Image (cartoon, rainbow, N blue to C red):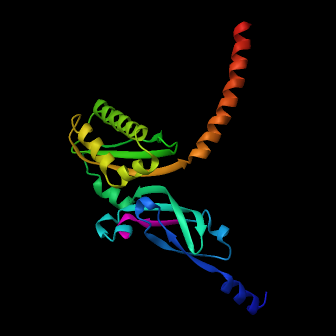
Amino acid sequence: MSERSVSRQKQQKRWYDVLAPEQFDREKLGETPADEPDKALGRTIETTLGDLRNDASENNTKLKFKITEVASDTAYTEFIKHELTRDYLRSLVRRGSSKIEAYITVLTTDDYRVQIQPVALTTKSADESQEKAIRRTMIDLVEESASERTFEDLIDSIVEGRLSSAIYNEAKTIYPLRRVEIQKTTLEARPEEVAAEEETAVDVDEEDVGVDTDEAEE
């Protein structure tokens, strides 16, 4: 390919401003080049909550977004992941204390499937029954929170720290806690993907029921 052709291709590329979702005030996340709008779809961009809010104290929270729509010279995104940095998580761990984790998959009121990973850190070493009770409390509160909220509201409660505070206030009655955090949140499936999975599952279940019925008759 000649230098002139390469130069022409570069000139044809257009830069798109990448914006955060409305719940993050459409803050600019950066820019991305593409010679066709559709080629920008599906790209991901990572930033920190500190960068979005111009607050260095929140740089320990990483956020990831995916481009889902391109219009004019703007690329719009949706939230796909929230995660605390490893350095920050390591700084929370103390010798002689317990680290209690849970991995919970929930469905919001508007049918987004999300995996949420809370972590509780005790002041001293808890015994097995106390750890189990704290983990159960985390699971119950996360499931309850999701069952009452839309995807956007759930993410807000996580990013703003309201969900971790609710877990802390409930679980500290079981054993003294030093900290509760939501260490990771991941969007697993959007409503249309959840609906497609459920439809497939129903088809499989109907086949299974037929087999079970025949076996019962025998």
Judge by depth and name the residue closer to the eye, 27 or 166.
27
Q: Is residue 88 above or below residue 122?
A: below
Q: Quadrant of residue 34?
A: bottom right
Q: Position of residue 20 (x, y in %)?
A: 47, 65
Q: Is residue 50 magenta?
A: yes
The quarter in which the C terminus is drawn is top right
- At 59% from the left edge and 63% from the top edge, which residue is drawn? 69
Tell whether 145 sits left or right of 206. Answer: left
Residue at image position (55%, 72%) is 74
Q: Nearer the viewer, residue 214 or 156?
A: 156
Which residue appears farthest toward the bottom when viewing the image? 4
Q: Residue at the location (38% across, 51% down)?
A: 183
Where residue 175 sits in the image (x, y, percent)?
22, 37
In the rendered view, tell whether residue 128 sits above or below residue 145: above
**Quadrant including the N terminus:** bottom right
What is the residue that sits farthest to the front in this orientation? 72
Magenta stretch: give its range: 45-51
Rendered location of residue 21, percent (x, y): 47, 61
On the image, the x and y values in percent for residue 214 come to 74, 13
Position of 157 with respect to 4 (left or right) is left
- Residue at 21% in and 45% down: 123
**Magenta stretch: includes residue 197:** no
